[in-house]
Image (tube, rainbow, N blue to C red):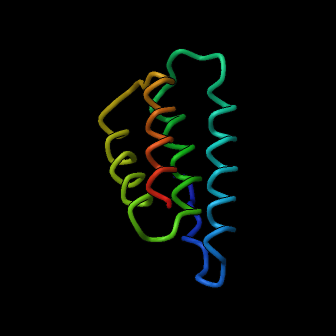
Amino acid sequence: MTEATEAPATDQTDTEINERTEAAIAAFRRQLEGQVSVPASVVQDGLLDLWGLLPAGDSRAVVERWLTETLERSLYSVTDVDSRLDSVLARQD
């Protein structure tokens, strides 16, 4: 079981949270580069890291629903993961 950290403390600014989230998503995307598909476990690991950075709200809810979905799937296309990561970023604003 992976241990995820709790959401950031409220003393962090929105800008700091957004920067950390964008950096985590960029790192996740680098991990996927050059691949066509990835196992659900890889997606879970990336999402757990991301979930730990997000405060309560729309973005975190999207990640939580996606994490639940990964329990029922075995494979994801990288293009699907990439577009979903865009939706997480879009909900952050």
Q: Residue at x 37, y 53 (%)?
A: 62
Q: Residue at x 44, y 71 (%)?
A: 56
Which picture quadrant has residue 28?
top right
Residue 55 shown left or right of residue 26 in the figure:
left
Q: Residue at x 43, y 28 (%)?
A: 80
- Residue most extreme to the bottom: 11
Q: Is residue 63 above or below residue 83?
A: below
Residue 59 shown left or right of residue 27 in the figure:
left
Q: How many marks?
A: 0
* Residue 40 point in image, percent of width and height: 45, 32
Q: Residue at x 33, y 31 (%)?
A: 73
* Residue 93 point in image, percent of width and height: 50, 61
Which picture quadrant has residue 66?
top left
- Residue most extreme to the front: 93
* Residue 11 point in image, percent of width and height: 65, 84
* Residue 1 point in image, percent of width and height: 52, 52
